[in-house]
Amino acid sequence: MDCRDPGRGTRSRSHQLVCHKREIQGEELKKFCSRVSKLLQKEDLGSDAVDALRRLFLIVSATKYNRKLEKTCVDLLQTTLCLPTCPEQLQLLCAAILREMSPCDSLSLSCDHIQNTRQLSLVASVLLAQGDKKQEVTNMGLRVFKVLESRQPEGPSLRPLLPVLSKVASLAPGTLHKDQTNLLNKRLVDWLRYASVQQGLAHSSGGFFSTPRARQPGPVMEVDGAVATDFFTVLCMGQHFTEDQWLNVQAFSMLRAWLLHSSPEGAGTPDTDDRSELEGSTLSVLSAAPSTSRLLPPQERLREKAFEYCQRLIEQSNRRALRKGDADLQKACLVEAVLVLDVLCRQDPAFLYRTLSCLKALRARLCGDAASVRALLPLAHFFLSHGEAVAVDSEAVCQHLFTRTPSELFHSPTLAFEFVQFCRDNLPLFGRNLGVLRLSFPSLFKFLAWNSPPLTAEFVALLPSLVDAGTAVEMLHALLDLPCLTAALDLQLRSSPAASERPLWDASLRTPSCLEAFRDPQFQGLFQHLLRAKASGTAERLAPLHQLLQPMASCARVVQCAEAVPTLLQAFFSAVTQLTDKALTNQLALLLLERTDSLYQVPGYEASVHRVLSSQFLSLCMRHPALVVEQAKELLEFVGSSSGLRSGASMLTSVVWAIGEYLSVCWDRRCTVEQINKFFEALEALLFEATQSRPSAVFPKCPPQVITALMTTLTKLASRSQDLIPRVSLFLSKMRTLALSPATSSVQCEEDMGAVRTRATELLNLLKMPSVAQFVLTPSVDVSEPRYHRDANTALPLALRTVSRLVEKEMGLLPG
Amino acid sequence: MVHAFLIHTLRVPQAENTGLCRVLYSCVFGAENSPDDPRPHGAERDRLLRKEQILAVARQVESMCQLQQQASGRPPTDLQPQSSDEPVPLHEAPHGAFRLEAGDPFQESRTVVWLGVLSLGFALVLDAHENLLLAEGTLRLLARLLLDHLRLLAPGANVLLRADRIEGILVRFLPHGQLLFLNDQFVQSLEKEFSAALPR
């Protein structure tokens, strides 16, 4: 069956193959199993067996539901896997099939008698996939340790077993006894620190009697080709490697996890027995000369050697690598070294002093080297968590990290992710530096603006810690301008000299006018503000940039960012409402009004942002009702300017509703009749405008919710300033007739008009009894208490019932 | 450590009739400890859950990759196979990382590193505090090895029926999900060892 994966035509073929394997059922599967069984029972397991097992793997793995394989077949798979003479290819397939079936109750695999370590490792992979239901993981850990204990110098290779131990330690950390832990600690010390510094011999498969090499292997090299003068590490080169050099690689690869598992935090120095034994003899020596560590208990000795190893790696990572792959490895080693040092210092503060001198030098080196920026993150973490203990200020490294790094490297997707993750994970450690982090939000937003899909969720989690009263207003502006920032970052990349690593940008997009504007001195100030690295304390109005950047509004990255903004705004507001600052609430409410018609015109952006802003405006009013009175002037301007009508209905509806609800002496004693009258007049004019005007380009069709909100608010205001009642009654009855007239029905749909009509009628009826109207429309503050709605004899339900009874009676609908 | 490695299809966004996102190969290194399930189908359910988790990762990687492709203006034709002789420039391939919060879909919080090569997605599901730089390097290495040794992009290649080769590569370069610090020469040695053990 030919089946290629890349490409569309071939993809559908692989799709067919998967579907076909998935549909194999009952009889066919049975037949296939017995074929596999026959093949596995043969004396020599040839390519037929390989081919059949490959297919069996596909059959088992292609479905998420269980495959019932014949018992003989499953048994044979297990025996073949454990067969000492079985070729690797078949073992791999057997192990893979059994692993794909797991967890499965019918396996009887055991690792007790397997001598070959490679086979043992494969069996382990199946058992680990089984889960720890029958203590498989524990038993396997014990077995692997047995092999480790009994190890003869010429015994089986331990290479396949170390990763198993690492996995066991992470899956079932409690299963290892102290003896075992100590044994592994000792072995790790040997492999880490005392691996051969001579290159290995070239292995020919002839084994012991192969032709002797004419040349003796030389010493191992450093990454820059120099002869290594110190012990072997993962950054040492050679043509061939010895067994202990391979183990060195594995030992370092598992070191950090092992240190953490073998000595969980809090239990800083668990070997108190060992320590007391040695106390008299070593402790004084220890502080003087750490190199005489032979007498230390195994765990501490491992830490000591781990420390030396990391120090050597840091030194080695400063060498110029000859190959690109090695240069990448140097960076990864640097990160790991700093992470291991952090673990060591947490477990034993005695390392702090020595570590610090080494890391301070590293900090100086890294701050000048953009290529090693990834190591700055663990380094900053180190200074954040230990800086205080050793009286070293972590501010410098934080400053560097938060301001320069994002501006230069916002386009690297993995750095962006790691950076934001670093901020999120280290929040409890920031302490004094939290201020630095908060002021750097414009930098952090660059990551977000450029990489919004993977980072939106991260920022939703991070925002509550970034927001504070001092920067909230500036941050809200920045969030609303986020798509604009995306466009500006794009221009920044395009106009900067070729970056060392070509970032992924849209080369198909041609925006010469935008690039010109970006370089135009007239707009430099605005662009600089948009691309600032730290909070400036001011909020520039970026409306001119919205115009300039319009050609980029439809590019995919900008649209993606715009789609993320509503979610981010929600997160911002739920964080900001935790700050109960009245002045800030007022400022934010005004900002919402101001930004309603000042947004970057990305398709669909305005509508979705308006939905969030309008609901947030209401919740701001709810938290601080007096803001309606305090910001009366601005609110009047907003409803008078008709920008509300133009920019969609949701914000206007919220503002109008808030006026009706909170412009009252109940909420603020400073509310005057004049104020109420002023608002009444402004809203009356607005309602007139909204209902009289024909829909046009300037005034789109006025949505019925705006009309009903306006009518309700006018009625509410009239009930508080009762001289206005005749005016509003007249208006309402006009509205009722208007809603009936065929001229209006042609522009508004019938259903909408029906709603307007009903609301007008209700309000008119209510106004017939002004004192009841006031009671219903301006309920006292404690109406929100549940009692008012549950207890039929208390105020509101009672009042409403009374009103409707009276009104109905008046209309003569009720007899008597 | 790495919790899982997977290879899956990447579809052309907005194209019709391209089927579903398919996991072509996956390997989960060790089971997440599941709460004891006394019901008789415990094992079956666990397996189903494991498969669903992997598919959930594949779907997310696919959409992340599509979004990145769109954002960087790569036309979907880029997903078409090129001439198989040309080496695929892995350093320019779309790549990224994202977090999976605890409980969705794995019990613990995990990080996914991914790489998109033409119509194939490669991903590692990592424990939360793994060395991301090393993981990225390892993923690139694995992708390169798989492309070379399985000739994934060549006509007639079939990832679905080459499980032994994938396993052979993983056993050496990502044993039990352990990320290894391998310098160039260690990589070469392992590659030679692999070629000797599983000749073409």
Image (cartoon, coloured by chain):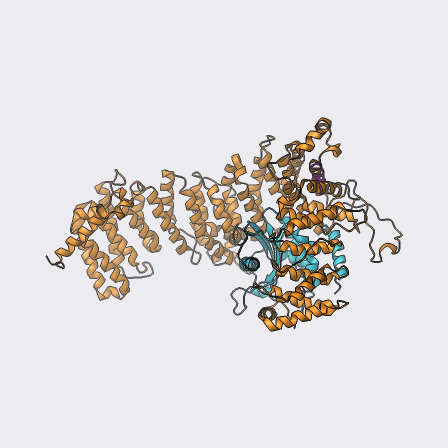
- In this view, the residue in front, A3 or A620, is A3
- In this view, the residue in front, B49 or B38, is B38
Say which residue appears at 34% left-offset and 47% top-offset: A618
- In this view, the residue in front, A717 or B174, is B174
User: Looking at the rendering, in which quadrant would you find the C terminus of chain A?
Assistant: bottom left
The part of the chain drawn in magenta is A303-318
Decide if residue A519 is in sight here.
Answer: no
Say which residue appears at 66% left-offset and 57% top-offset: A126
Q: Chain A in the picture: what colour?
A: orange
Q: Relative to A495, say whether A260 is above or below.
A: above
Residue A270, horizontal then vertical, whole percent: 64, 35
Name the residue furthest left. A816
User: Looking at the rendering, in which quadrant would you find the N terminus of chain A?
Assistant: bottom right
Residue A477, horizontal then vertical, whole percent: 43, 46
Residue A594, horizontal then vertical, whole percent: 37, 47
Instruction: Tell whether position B141 is magenta.
Output: no
Which secondary structure is most common in the magenta stretch?
A: helix
Q: Relative to A226, say whether A699 is above or below.
A: below
Q: Is residue A108 left or right of residue A751?
A: right
Q: Is residue A162 left or right of residue A104?
A: right
Count the labels in the image. 0
Instruction: Tell whether position A307 is magenta.
Output: yes
Say which residue appears at 68% left-offset and 66% top-offset: A53
Residue A692, horizontal then vertical, whole percent: 25, 59
Q: Chain B in the picture: what colour?
A: cyan
Q: Is residue B193 left or right of residue A588?
A: right
Quadrant assignment, res A396: top right
Decide if residue A551 is in sight here.
Answer: yes
- In this view, the residue in front, A657 or A634, is A657
